[in-house]
Every structure is written in C-alpha cells, then in structure tokens.
Amino acid sequence: MPLETTKWDATEFLNDEETIFAYIEAAFEDGDPAVITKALGNVARARGMTSIAKEAGVTREALYKALNENGDPRLSTLAGVTKALGFKLTVTPA
C-alpha cells in the first residue's frame, strides 16, 4: 500500500502573534532572501493578502508576485509589507 502524503502549509500554523514573530525572526536570521520572501508571503496569506496589500500600498496581484517562490520584492514593497504585518525593520551588528 503506497504512503499517502499531503502538502504541508505553514499558514495553518501561523495563528498567533508569538508564532508569527518567531517564524519571521528565524527567516531573517537565516539571511537567505528566498527564505525571507517565502516567510513574509506565508504570513501575509495567513493574515489575508487583500488587507495586507492594501495596507502595504500595493495591489493584491503585485503582492502575490513579489512574495511568491521566485519573487524578488523591491525594498519599498518589503518595507510596506513588514509595516503592514506589524513589524519594524532594524539593523544590528552581525
């Protein structure tokens, strides 16, 4: 009998602020832009892409495009999304 699997969806587990913050923090600590983009996209989907796009000042379609697996968001989009998600970008010494 073959093993049945289902696709894992991170958004199912992003249901409270503490979990969301830890998830985003881990993505930024990883430092890989693809990981950061994917994490921001997952959180935006969990919170509702339409409302996040509106708060970020971009269209929903543009937000999906910027935060998809191959996305490369502009700095202005990144800043808008992080603000809309309730985060502040800061810099600390490495």
Image (cartoon, rainbow, N blue to C red):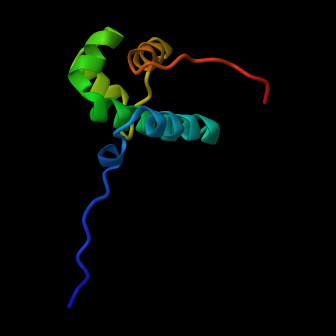
Q: Residue at image x 44%, y 18%? A: 86
The quadrant where residue 84 appears: top left
> Horizontally, is 18 left or right of 94 in the view?
left
Q: Nearer the viewer, residue 75 or 29?
A: 29
Q: Looking at the figure, which quarter contains the N terminus? A: bottom left
Q: Residue at image x 24%, y 28%? A: 48
Q: Is residue 34 visible?
A: no
Q: Looking at the figure, which quarter contains the C terminus? A: top right
Q: In the figure, 79 relative to 72: above or below? A: above
Query: Residue 39, percent across and down?
Result: 44, 38
Query: Residue 27, percent across and down?
Result: 54, 39
The quadrant where residue 30 appears: top right
Query: Residue 66, percent across and down?
Result: 36, 26
Q: Nearer the viewer, residue 51 or 33?
A: 51
Q: Is residue 10 visible?
A: yes
> Horizontally, is 92 left or right of 22 in the view?
right
Query: Residue 38, percent across and down?
Result: 42, 39
Give the farthest residue toward the bottom. 1
The quadrant where residue 15 appears: top left
> Count of labels shown?
0
Q: In the figure, 40 relative to 6: above or below? A: above
Q: Residue at image x 50%, y 15%? A: 75
> Horizontally, is 43 left or right of 53 in the view?
right
